[in-house]
């Protein structure tokens, strides 16, 4: 079984290599050189000496772009061993605008977007075209078309009627405004350069120390023997891997290559196995301490520390996984699925004794971020140093010696190319939204159509965010939705943190929502199941999780805003409500067994009452479910009064 785990996890490397060039010979040393310079540059700037924002963000974008054009082929038949001359052309085109800007920085930055020269416009056009090509290579046509639509709106919006109309801007002003710290070099790329890069390096160090395999083994030892064990293993391992991956699809690939075959072998249908993996992997972006790039952007937008955002996300992410656990448990109970034999599972105590040190750096990171409120990059630095120090006391092949450290510093930055691209593309969109005032107009639309109803405004926000997220990375969908929809929620009385967290939550969940469900389709491909069916089934399994954002908007105690009594009460009722909702969705509940449609309606009503904040609704919900249990108990009694097994299935 241990060899099987290694074989499954090794498939991840094959999947990654299939879409990238093989790093051999001169290309390897070129990439390693760029990666090492990038790692040392970021460490120096973030830990020792700050640089001008233009210089720092531009260098981050240029280095990320150079890695992208060197590693990612531009078309299907392009060479997998060396860059094409076209790639070198794009590299030169990426560097040229920034060389131009820094040749006369003070003058150029004051002209861009206000009174640009012809050369300013040309350089802006070049950098926009390069970013569009970067977007096409790593994010696909969905984000590329979205960016083009926003650019077109910035120019042609003058001709549109109604609320979409704006005063109009010349093409020169529009394009050069996008090439500023209000656009391409704005908050998204700032978050990527300042926070995300070091977290990616931290994930690379963990991966080099064997964390991916340990997380899967840890989940198997904890949940593998329970009812529907393989599905619960996915629930646990996805939450652990999600703490450092911050990507739904990456989580599916890492976790799913092992968990999906294991679920299928234990009796789960391919469709359900893939749906469970998609459901559990999607929420990895919600789990602190690494919540994906969008969470860093959120911290900047609302002016809070990243640690505070992580703290706020603890209970909502836990509720999602609690709901997922019981969805799997009740499905397994309804279909008679068992757990795995203990003989096929690793020993929990032996595993923790041998590999438990890998949890210490995560604990250090969480402590530094959330308890002592250390800056994210210093928290990552201490977590990496602790990981390196602890690894020296383990077997030789598991130690992070000088060779492994150097390898991570050289190759680890490859993980940033997609994020740099997405953030730069999102910056173009944010620039257009800022210039045209589109965000304020969207807020007016939401408020107008909701007629002042917060519930309806939240529902509209959810729909728009999910639609934006279809085919777009979470970073892009959150950034767009937050810039346009968060002001409406704030105007309706929602504090900024829950408003942005609500949008972030559904930007993440869009990865499993049909018709374009990236995480569900990735899982379906591994399971060899119908992608369309997997998408809808994963949405059903995640249904309880869709309610969680509404809960913390109406009850801020669930994001730790309030006293401990209020937080404890809200948490208890929320957990019970999610469990009852899982029972209503699956039509099965522990100690009762199968539920008929009337009973499922009672469960649904009780769950919604418990999920809505307030002691009165909680009390009514408890009375409703207590009455149902009492009715079932009375019905199960024999005429003689002897009590028989209740609802055994």
Image: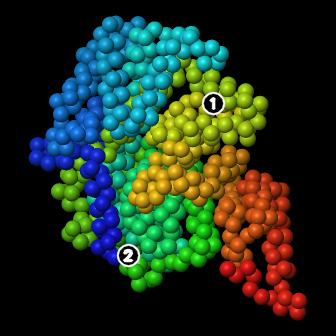
The x and y percentages for residue 144 are 41, 30
The x and y percentages for residue 416 are 33, 42
Could you tell me which residue is drawn at 54 percent across and 36 percent down?
468
Could you tell me which residue is drawn at 38 percent across and 56 percent down?
253
How does the figure colour the protein chain or chains? rainbow
Q: Secondary structure at mark 1?
A: helix
Image: 342 above or below 613 = below
| Count of picture labels | 2
Q: Quadrant of residue 9?
A: bottom left
Q: Find the residue positioned furthest to the left.
A: 25
Left/right placement of residue 65 relative to residue 262 reads left
The front one of 287 and 85 is 85
Could you tell me which residue is drawn at 57 percent across and 57 percent down?
537
Q: Quadrant of residue 183?
A: top left
Q: Secondary structure at mark 2?
A: helix
The x and y percentages for residue 232 are 52, 68
Q: Of callouts 2 and 1, which one flags the residue occurring earlier in the amino acid sequence?
A: 2
Inspect this view and state whether residue 575 appears: no
**Marks 2 & 1, CB-CB < 8 Å contact:** no
Q: Quadrant of the C terminus?
A: bottom right
Q: What mark, if any, has residue 487 been given in the picture?
A: 1
Q: Quadrant of the N terminus?
A: bottom left
Q: Find the residue positioned furthest to the front.
A: 530
The x and y percentages for residue 120 are 33, 12
Q: Quadrant of residue 65?
A: top left
Could you tell me which residue is drawn at 54 percent across and 15 percent down?
157
Q: Residues within 10 Å of mark 1 (few under 14, many from 20)?
A: many
What residue does disc 2 label? 351
Inspect this view and state whether residue 594 appears: yes
């Amino acid at each position: 079984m241990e060899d099987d785990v290694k074989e499954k996890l090794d498939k991840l490397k094959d999947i990654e290599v299939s879409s990238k060039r093989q790093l051999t010979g001169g290309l390897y040393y070129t990439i390693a050189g760029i990666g090492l310079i990038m790692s040392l540059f970021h460490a120096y700037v973030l830990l020792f000496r700050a640089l001008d924002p233009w210089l720092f963000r531009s260098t981050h974008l240029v280095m990320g772009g150079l890695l992208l054009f060197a590693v990612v082929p531009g078309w299907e038949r392009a060479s997998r061993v060396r860059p094409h001359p076209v790639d070198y052309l794009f590299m030169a085109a990426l560097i040229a605008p920034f060389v131009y800007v820094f040749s006369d920085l003070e003058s150029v930055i004051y002209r861009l977007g206000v009174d640009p020269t012809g050369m300013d416009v040309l350089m802006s056009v070049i950098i926009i075209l390069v970013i569009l090509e970067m977007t096409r290579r790593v994010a696909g046509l969905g984000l590329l078309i979205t960016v083009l639509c926003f650019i077109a709106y910035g120019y042609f919006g003058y001709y549109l009627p109604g609320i979409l109309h704006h005063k109009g801007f010349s093409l020169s002003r529009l394009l050069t405004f996008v090439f500023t710290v209000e656009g391409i070099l704005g908050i998204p790329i700032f978050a990527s350069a300042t926070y995300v890069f070091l977290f990616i390096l931290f994930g690379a160090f963990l991966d080099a120390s064997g964390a991916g395999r340990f997380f899967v083994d840890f989940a198997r030892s904890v949940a593998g023997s329970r009812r529907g064990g393989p599905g619960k293993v996915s629930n646990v391992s996805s939450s652990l891997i999600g703490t450092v991956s911050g990507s739904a699809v990456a989580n599916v690939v890492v976790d799913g290559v092992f968990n999906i075959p294991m679920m299928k072998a234990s009796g789960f249908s391919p469709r359900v196995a893939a749906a469970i993996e998609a459901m559990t992997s999607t929420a990895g972006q919600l789990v602190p301490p690494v919540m994906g790039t969008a969470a860093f952007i959120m911290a900047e937008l609302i002016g809070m520390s990243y640690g505070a955002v992580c703290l706020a996300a603890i209970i909502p992410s836990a509720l999602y996984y609690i709901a997922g656990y019981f969805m799997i448990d009740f499905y397994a109970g309804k279909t008679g699925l068992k757990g795995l034999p203990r003989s096929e599972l690793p020993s929990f105590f032996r595993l923790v004794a041998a590999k438990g040190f890998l949890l210490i750096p995560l604990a250090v990171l969480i402590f530094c971020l959330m308890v002592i409120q250390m800056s994210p990059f210093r928290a990552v630095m201490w977590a990496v140093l602790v990981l390196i120090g602890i690894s020296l006391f383990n077997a030789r092949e598991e130690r992070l010696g000088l060779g492994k450290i150097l390898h991570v510093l050289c190759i680890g930055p490859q993980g940033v190319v997609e994020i740099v691209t997405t953030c730069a593309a999102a910056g173009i969109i944010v620039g257009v939204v800022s210039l045209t005032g589109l965000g304020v107009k969207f807020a007016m639309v939401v408020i107008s159509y909701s007629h002042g109803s917060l519930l309806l405004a939240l529902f509209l926000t959810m729909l728009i965010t999910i639609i934006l997220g279809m085919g777009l990375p979470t970073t892009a969908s959150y950034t767009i939705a937050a810039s346009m929809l968060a002001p409406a929620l704030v105007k309706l009385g929602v504090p900024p943190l829950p408003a942005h967290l609500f949008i972030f939550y559904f930007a993440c969940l869009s990865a499993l929502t049909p018709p374009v469900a990236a995480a569900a389709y990735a899982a379906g491909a591994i399971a060899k199941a119908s992608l369309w069916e997997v998408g809808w089934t994963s949405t059903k399994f995640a249904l309880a999780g869709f309610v969680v954002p509404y809960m913390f908007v109406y009850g801020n105690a669930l994001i730790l805003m309030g006293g401990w009594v209020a937080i404890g009460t809200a948490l208890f009722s929320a957990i019970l409500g999610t469990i009852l909702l899982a029972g209503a969705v699956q039509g099965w509940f522990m100690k009762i067994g199968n539920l008929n449609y009337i009973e499922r309606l009672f469960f649904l009503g009780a769950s919604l009452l418990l999920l809505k904040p307030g002691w009165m609704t909680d009390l009514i919900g408890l009375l409703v479910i207590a009455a149902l249990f009492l009715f079932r108990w009375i019905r199960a009694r024999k005429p003689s009064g002897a009590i028989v097994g209740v609802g055994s299935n």
